[in-house]
Amino acid sequence: MALLKILIFPDQRLRTVAKDVLDINEEIKTLCNDLLETMYEGKGIGLSATQVNIHKRILVVDVSEEKDSPMIFINPSVEVLGQEEKTYGEGCLSVPGFFEEVSRPAKIKITALNLGGEEFSIEAEDLLAVAVQHEMDHLDGKIFVDFLSNLKRQRIKQKLIKISRTAV
Ligand code: GNR
Ligand code: NI
């Protein structure tokens, strides 16, 4: 097990579009475990491979209270169910210290591969739907700040650049 280094906005590597996983081998299994460990260490509810500079279509989430329900999605796809949208105050381990309201489809169906290479589908709403859509965006090079006004995004960017300059 290993903790991975998380890229911080506005790092351009966060803009990379991830590629499908072609073979679920030991390297991929280790990566999934390392993603979960890194997510738990960062007190996150989700993490994408993109955020640790590995541009493969893998995301992990755990939205449980007890932090005992890890979920792994390989090559995930999302289908929106219904028209309802919900707004949630989102944060991101790649945008530390900032929380902003983002509106997204309330109910989705996720189809993905598990570590055994088997396809599965689940329906999600509430925090799970938010987290999976937030992570899916990362795999496509998108970040939640993209949904904010240019002014807000610019302010967040300048503050994080300043912090990264100050930190050693
Ligand atoms: O830990 C996280 N919390 C969170 C809160 C609201 C909406 C999305 C998230 S995901 C985030 C972890 C993260 O950055 N995943 O990419
Ligand atoms: Ni994020």
Image (cartoon, helix red, strand yellow):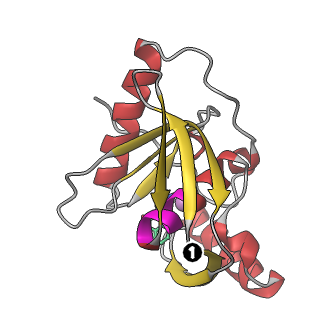
Q: Give the structural element (helix, strand or loop) at label 1.
A: loop
- Where residue 17 sits in the image (x, y, percent)? 75, 41
Where in the figure is residue 16, as x and y percent of width and height?
75, 42
- For image coordinates 32% across by 32% down, the residue present is 2
Q: Is residue 26 visible?
A: yes
Is residue 163 shown in magenta? no
Q: Is 22 placed left or right of 131 in the picture?
A: right
Looking at the image, which residue is at 65% across and 69% down? 144
- Work out whether residue 129 or residue 80 is closer to the camera in this orientation and state it: 80
> Can you identify the residue that label 1 sits on?
106
Which stretch appears magenta? Answer: 127-132
Quadrant showing the N terminus = top left
Q: Position of residue 155 (x, y in %)?
A: 71, 82
Whether residue 18 sits left or right of residue 7 in the image: it is right
Q: Amino acid at mark 1?
A: Ala
Label 1 CB-ligand 1 distance < 8 A = no
User: Left of 76 or right of it: where is 12?
Assistant: right
Magenta span: chief secondary structure: helix
